[in-house]
Image (tube, coloured by chain):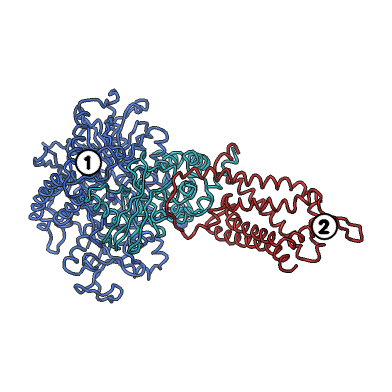
Amino acid sequence: MNGIFSSSLGKKLIMSITGLFLMIFLLVHLTVNLMLLFGDGKLFNFAANFMATNQLIEVVEPVLAIGFIVHIIYASIITLLNQRTRPMGYIQTSSNGVTSWASKNMYILGGAIFIFLVIHLINFFWKIKFGEVATLSYDNGLTQMADTYSLVSGLFITYWWYDLIYIAGALLLGFHLSHGFWSAFQTLGWNNKIWIKRLEIIAYIYAIIIAIGFTIIPLYFLILK
Amino acid sequence: MNIKLKIWRQPNAKSKGRFETYPLNDVSSEMSFLEMLDYLNNSLIKDGKEPVAFEHDCREGICGSCGMYISGRPHGPQHRTTTCELRMREFKDGQTITIEPWRAAAFPVIKDLIVDRNAFDKIMQSGGFISINAGAAQDANSILVPKKNADEAFDSASCVGCGACVAACKNSSAMLFISAKVTHLAQFPQGRIEAEIRVKNMVAKMDELGFGGCTNTRACEAECPKGISISNIAKLNREFFVAKLKD
Amino acid sequence: MSKLNSKIPDGPLADKWTNHKASLKLVNPANKGKLDIIVIGTGLGGSSSASTLGELGYNVKVFSYQDSPRRAHSVAAQGGINAAKNYKNDNDSIYRLFYDMLKGGDFRAREANVYRAAEVSNLVIDHYTALGVPFARDYGGTIDNRSFGGVQVSRTFYAKGQTGQQCLVGAYSALTRQIAKGTVTMYPRREMLDLVIIDGKARGIITRNLVTGEIERHSAHAVVLATGGYGTIYYMSTLALNSNASATWKAHKKGAFFANPSFVQIHPTSIPVLNSYQSKLTLMSESLRNDGRVWVPKKQGDTRKPNDIPEDERDYYLERRYPAFGNLVPRDVASRAAKERCDAGFGVGSTGLSVYLDFRDAIKKKGKKVIEENYGNLFDMYEKISGESPLETPMRIYPAGHYTMGGLWVDYNLMTTIPGLFAVGESNFSDHGANRLGASSLMQCSGDGYFILPYTITDYLASDIKTPRIKTDTPEFDAAEKEVSERVKKLLSINGNETPTSYHRRLGKIMWDYCGMVRNEEGLKKALVLIKELEDEFWKNVKVAGKAEELNQELEKAGRVMDFFELAKLLCTDALNRKESCGAHFREESQTETGEAKRDDDNFSYVAAWEYKGQGQEPELHKEELKFEYVKLQERNYK
C-alpha cells in the first residue's frame, strides 16, 4: 500500500471506491424515498424512522459523510493536477463519436450536484437532525415518530420551483452516474473488451433508474397534489 | 480541390508560435495528407517562405513518426488512421483545415508541428522490457503461450508510439500507451516475472513526466490509429493495484 | 593480389563459425567498460548490436536521425523472419535455409556467411520470443510458421503483417533496458555526416544535431554502421522517405569499399503509382502471394472490371510460366514477369502499370475469416490508399524498389576495409548475394547484431584495451568537422530555383528507367551521362530553404540527395561492369531464350568491391572471387 495514493492511479482508486459506495447509498436512498408515493405517508414515515433510529445507520452516516467529502476532495485534486498537463489548448476540437459529454465534464457535473446537495441537506437533513419536525402518533399513540412525510410533501407542494431544482438535481446525478458507474469498474480493473459493453449498459440502466426515480417524486407532488 | 490551411508555426522551442493561414489550390483528392503538405511546402519555398516542419518517415502508418491535430482530431477525421495514411478525399473542396501540433506539457513543441516525444522513451526505459540478455533464451517453443494471450499481446503491441492518445486525452494522459506495453508483456509467462515492478515503475514515471491521470473518457481509444482498446487500461489498473497492495 | 581478405575460416562449412568463434580473442569484463563503441542506426541491426554490446559491458553510443529508436525502418517489414527450426516437420534444416538463400541470391554470396546466417537464425527466434515478440501461435500454444516467397518449406515466423514492427519493438525494448542501465547512451535526432579516421582506424563520427543544427564530434574505439539500404535512390520506393545512404557513402569516401552496389531488389508486390504527387510506394507483403493469385487479362488493354473477366480470359502468368513455384517464385522473377506483361500491353489500371493479385479463390477455399485474420491489416492499408477492399475486388500491384543487397564490403568478421569500422544488416553486402529471399532480412540483421558482431568486434577490440578514450580535439576531428560545416554552408549558399526533393525525384526517374528492373549497356551509359548532368545542375541550382543552425528538413534532404548522386554513378558503373544477369540484376544482353536471367559464372563469379579514388576519379574495382565448395552452381530454376 506504501505510496499508493500519491500515484495518479491511487487517487483514481479512491474516486472509484467512494463512488461505488455512494452509488449503493443512492439506491437505498431511492428505495426509501419511493415510499413517498405509496399510501398516505405512513409507509415512508416508518421507513424514515427506521433509518433514523437504526444503530447500523448511525455508524454508516458519518462514513457516508466522509465518503462524500473524500470523493469531492479527490475530484478537486485530480482535476487540478490534470489541468496542468496541457498549458496550451487546441483552437479546434471535434467529436470523436465515442467520448460522452458527461465523461469530459464530471467535475462540472459533480460541482452542480454538490450545490444541489447543500440545498437538499438544508431542506431535510438539517431539519430532521436538529428537531424542527413535528411528531406524529401511529397505532393509537403507541408509536411516536417524526412526520418526515409532511416535511417533504410540504416543501414540494408549497414551492413548485423546489420541484424543478430536485428534478434538475436528479438529472445531473443521472448524467454523472452514466459515466461514473462503469468508470468505477474500469478504474478498479474489473473490465475487459467483453465486459465494457455490458458495464456501459448496466451503467445506463442504473443512471436512468436513479434519475427517473428521483424525478418521479417531485413530479408526483407537483402534478398530483 | 481548393482548400485553406490554418497551421501552427513556431520557429523553435523557445519562441512563441502563432497560426498562419495558407490558401492551397489544385489539391488532388488522391493525395495523401502529407503529400498535400509536401505540395504546400514546395509552393512556400518557391515563394521564398519557410516550409512547414512536420515529422514523417515510413508513410505507411507503422513508424509512428507523423502525428498532428487535424481539424480538431489527432490524425484527422478518419478512424484508425495515421496522418500519413489519411487521404485528401476525406476533406471537402473549400474547407479550412486547422493543423496543430500535439499539445501536452510532456510533449513540448520543437518546431512547427514537430513535438518532442522523448517522454515515451523514458517511460519505456523505466520498465517496458523483459530483462534477458542475448544468448540466454531457451528454445522458442519451450514457452507455450495460449493463442488467445498471444493474439491479445499482439493487439497491445501494435502500438506505434505516435502519441495520439496523449494528444486526444483532455488530461494528456499516457495511460493507453503504458497500458498497452504492460498488457503486452503481461500476457507472456516470461513477462510475468517482472510484471509487478514494471507496472509500478512505468506508472511512477508517467506521473513524474507530467502526463495526467486517466478519467476514462475513451478519447484515446477512439483516436488510436491502431485501435488499442481501453481494456488495456483496466488490465493496467488491475496489475498496478495488485502489485501495489503488497507494498 | 587483391586487397580484399575475406578471412573466411578453414574447415567444413558447418564448423566454420564454431571454429572461428573459438579462435576469436576476448576482452576482460573489467576492460569492456573502458572501450567505447559507436553504433549508427537503431533498426534491428543497430538496436541488436547496441543492446548486446551494452549487455556485454561496453560503453555504447547509439545514434538515430529519428526521435526514437523504435521508428527505424525495420519497423515496416511485414511478412516475417526466417529460421531453420523445422517446427513444421517439413524436413527443413540449417543446410536447407542456407541453400535456399544462396540459390535465391543466385550464387553471388559467400557460402560461409550465408551458412552462418542460417546457423544463428534459430537463436534469433529464441531471443525475440524471450523478449516478448508476439509471434503468431497455434491453439496448442506453440509458434506457427508459414511459407514465404521462393521456398518450399514453412519456416517463416510472423506476427500478422507487422513482423518488423513487432521485432523492432522487442529489440527496442532490449535497447531501452541498456539505456536505463547506462551502458548505452542514446543520441536521437542526429545524422552522421562524416567518419573520422585516426591512424588508419575508424575512431569517431561527425554528426549534425537535427534540432539545433550543431555539428558535433563523437569518438569511440570502433564504429558500427547499421544504417540500412539505399533503395530511396529511386526516390519512390517502399522505404521510409528519410532512409538514405549518406552514412555508408561517407564511409565509402573515407576508404570503405562498396560491394555490388547494383544489386537492388525490386519488390513485386507494392501498391502502384496512382498519381503524380505520390511520395512513396507502399509495400504489400509478399506473404500475400501465399493465398493471392497473380493475373492479368488475356486480352491486351482489357478495360473490364476484374470481377467481370471470366476465368478462361485470365492469364495467371506466374502459374503458367513457373508451375513448380507458381505465385511463390522469388521476388526478382515475379517483378520481371510483371514488368514483362505490362510492357507487352497486358497491364491493368489507368496507367497500365499494374497487375492483379486476387484472393477470390483463397476466400472460397479457406473462408473470409481466415484470410482476414492472416492479412487483415494489409488489406486495411491497401483500402485506405486505394479506396478498394481486396476482399471484394483484386488488389492492384506493381514492383517497386525495395531492398539493396549491395552495401559496404565486409569480411567474415563484418569489418569493412577500414579497420574498426563494422557494418551490419542491410548496410553491408554479405549474405543475400544478388537477390534476397523474403523474410531473410530481419533474420540477417538480427543475427548480425545479436550473435555475430558482438563476438567479432570483441576480437578487434582485444588489441585496443590499452588505448585510452579517443580525444575529439585532434586534427582529424578538426578537419572532418570543417569539411562538414563547409558542405552545409555550400548547400545553403547556392540559393537556386529547385528543391532537393525535385532533384531527388528526377534522379530517381533516371535510375528507375535505366538502372531498375532491367538494364542494358546503352541505357547505363546514358544514365551515367544524365546523372552527371543532373548533379552539375544540382550544385548550381538547388534551393535549400532555411538556416544551418536550426531544425532544417530541406538541408537534411539536400545532403542526402547530394550523396545519392555520387552513389547513383557507382551503381550504374557496377551494373555496367557486371555484364551477366544474376538475381535482381538483369542485363538484357544476358538472358536465356525464354527470357530468364542468364548467369556467367566463368567471368562474374565474384564480389565487385569498389574503392573510392577521389572526387571526379573513376572508382577502382577489386574482385573477391567466390568459391563454392559445398554447393554446385546451377541455373536458378523455379519451373
Nearer the observer, C510 or C314:
C510
Chain C's shade in the image?
Answer: blue
Q: Nearer the viewer, mark 1 or mark 2?
A: 2
Residue C521 shown left or right of residue B125 in the figure: left
Residue located at (77% from left, 47% from top):
A58
For marks 1 and 2, give the CA distance: 91 Å
In the rendered view, tell whether residue B81 sits above or below residue B118. Answer: below
Secondary-structure class at tag 2:
loop
* Residue B115: x %, y % from top left: 37, 44
Label 2: few (<14), some (14–19) or many (≥20) C-alpha neighbours in 10 Å: many
* Residue C151: x %, y % from top left: 28, 57
In the rendered view, tell whether residue C360 sits above or below residue A191. Answer: below
Work out which quarter of the rendered image holds the C terminus of chain C and state it: bottom left
Labels 1, 2: one chain: no
- In which chain is the residue bearing label 1? C
Residue C603 visible within the image: no
- Residue indicated by mark 2: A147
* Residue C348: x %, y % from top left: 23, 68
Residue A95 visible within the image: yes
Label for residue C561? Answer: none
Work out which quarter of the rendered image holds the N terminus of chain C and state it: top left
Residue located at (37% from left, 33% from top):
C56
Label 1: few (<14), some (14–19) or many (≥20) C-alpha neighbours in 10 Å: many
Task: Give the tally of numbered discs.
Answer: 2
Q: Amino acid at mark 2?
A: Asp
